Amino acid sequence: MKKYYNFETMFISLRDALRAFLDENGFYFEISGNGAYYHFEILADRIGADAINNFIESVTITEVK
């Protein structure tokens, strides 16, 4: 079952990378500006949502403890 997931970023490079990933993988999405942020609404099933989350984690800098 598909549902809408949302994601926001203020980084143009992440916006562009996510947009390219979604296009390349056939996801339906809408993007809008929200002040200094870019807001994504993405239609996906659970497997698609996992793939999107994995992609975001792969291109995002995280703190290592």
Image (tube, rainbow, N blue to C red):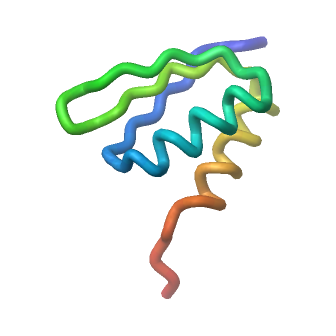
Q: Is residue 47 left or right of residue 37?
A: right
Residue 51 percent location from the top left of the image: 75, 41
Q: Residue furthest bottom?
A: 65
* Quadrant of the rendered image containing residue 43: top right
Residue visible at 76% across and 28% down in the picture: 46
Residue visible at 46% across and 77% down in the picture: 63
Q: In this view of the protein, which residue sits in the foreground, 54 or 26?
A: 26
Q: In this view of the protein, which residue sits in the foreground, 4 or 55?
A: 55
Q: Is residue 64 left or right of residue 45?
A: left
Residue 53 percent location from the top left of the image: 64, 45
Residue 16 percent location from the top left of the image: 51, 41
Q: In this view of the protein, which residue sits in the foreground, 65 or 40?
A: 40
* Quadrant of the rendered image containing residue 49: top right
Q: Residue furthest left?
A: 35
Please say if 4 is above or below 36: above
Please say if 21 is above or below 33: below
Q: Is residue 9 left or right of residue 29?
A: left
Residue visible at 77% across and 21% down in the picture: 26
Residue visible at 78% across and 12% down in the picture: 1
Q: How many marks?
A: 0
Residue 28 percent location from the top left of the image: 66, 15
Please say if 17 is above or below 44: below
